[in-house]
Image: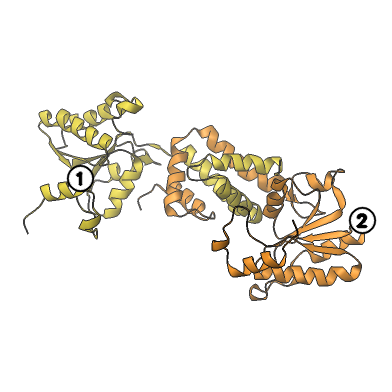
Chain colours: A orange, B yellow
Amino acid sequence: MYYAAPIARLLEELERLPGVGPKSAQRIAYHILRSEAEGTARLAEALLEVKRVIHFCPRCFDFTEGDLCATCADPERDAATVCVVEEPRDVVAIERTGGYRGLYHVLGGVISPVDGVGPEQLRVRELLDHIAEGTVTEVVVATNTTVEGETTALYLARMLKPLGLKVTRIASGLPVGGDLEYADEVTLGRALEARREL
Amino acid sequence: MYYAAPIARLLEELERLPGVGPKSAQRIAYHILRSEAEGTARLAEALLEVKRVIHFCPRCFDFTEGDLCATCADPERDAATVCVVEEPRDVVAIERTGGYRGLYHVLGGVISPVDGVGPEQLRVRELLDHIAEGTVTEVVVATNTTVEGETTALYLARMLKPLGLKVTRIASGLPVGGDLEYADEVTLGRALEARREL
């Protein structure tokens, strides 16, 4: 036992966080010990506040503080387009591009038979409920380009196209600034297939 | 603004922690949002508890929960030897070796004229107070082997030797398992100088 009990408890809790091992937990704990009590109180309060006030938006299932999330509540957003993503962090990534003006729908995961995740475990029914309102004309499937993401995209396309919806998929290809030489063959193959006239 | 205000506040507080950048702050925040409220409450309480109950040991200036720290309060420790270190984390490192049975003294830094840190900014007077009690016969200087750590070691040696104390310095040399080929010349030079008969 090298640590006083309260320090050992803090280390244990810090090590539960993703990406925090014993070394970084120790660094953070000693930082906390050295710093002002007010700063730590602010961090503790921010942690508790987030659990107290943040919940899922009942429409898109992104995290929100209000009743609806800022995107769903914004009358300026294009309600005819819904972008389907796996997780709330993907909404952040797409919003950062500044190039999308439609709404979102967070699935809460992807179809993954290995992990026992089928469409019933995802928010597919909720997506259908949203579509049933009649304003949506295009669904952009922006799941990751992993095997599970692609499977989920195909599943959604097969289900939604018969409803008369336009279902699109974000493009695969070379990252901007990427070197042909270092691209894997699947990505390069897709980039060729999806070539556009200049 | 991609985040709900409480999430943005949590991200800001997390990014103040050492080694936590925007990406890891986001990972931690989404982990918190997904996990049980009890786990977050435990983390928040561990943070607050550490600031509430942990203080410096009035004898060695390591962090402690009790009046004296566990080492200073242990009658089995050898009170004739005091190991001087820079920071509380160094006590943890030395305790881990299991090879030291004496007491500690945490300086709270090193002499560094560049950063405006002289002996007055460190706990040198407190070390002298401890020595004045008359039980200490050897002071092991275990500051880092940086320029500042060496300067501090020399300063302490010059001050303590006239008091009739044995002042020792932890050995510099090749790390165990280290390759001669990859050792820098200063380290290798010291390892040669400090050679011992087999």
User: Callout 1, which amino acid?
Assistant: Val
Residue B8: where, in percent of width, then height? 65, 41
- Compare residues B97 and A149 and report the one nearer the observer: A149
- Compare residues A10 and A56 and report the one nearer the observer: A56
Q: Which residue is mark 1?
A: B186
Q: Is residue B60 left or right of residue B185?
A: right
As measured in the structure, the alpha-carbon distance from the residue carrying label 1 to the one carrying label 2 is 73 Å
- Compare residues B112 and B135 and report the one nearer the observer: B112
Please say whether residue B194 is visible from this viewpoint.
no
Residue at image point 71% right, 60% down:
A86
User: Callout 2, which amino acid?
Assistant: Thr
Residue at image point 80% right, 65% down:
A124
Q: Which residue is the extreme one toward the bottom?
A: A113
Q: Is residue A184 left or right of residue A93?
A: left
Residue at image point 20% right, 30% down:
B155
Between circles 1 and 2, the one closer to the viewer is 1
Residue A46: where, in percent of width, then height? 62, 41
Q: Which residue is mark 2?
A: A135
Give the chain letter at badge 2.
A
Give the chain letter at badge 1.
B
Which quadrant, please, contains the N terminus of chain B?
top right
Element under label 1?
helix
Please say whether residue B177 is visible from this viewpoint.
yes
Residue A22: where, in percent of width, then height? 43, 54
Q: Is residue A114 above or below residue B140?
A: below
- Compare residues B130 and B179 and report the one nearer the observer: B179
Which of the 4 quarters of the picture holds residue B108?
Answer: top left
Crowding at mark 1 (Cα within 10 Å: few <14, some 14-19, many 20+): few
Q: Are marks 1 and 2 in contact (CB under 8 Å)?
A: no
Residue B151: where, in percent of width, then height? 23, 33
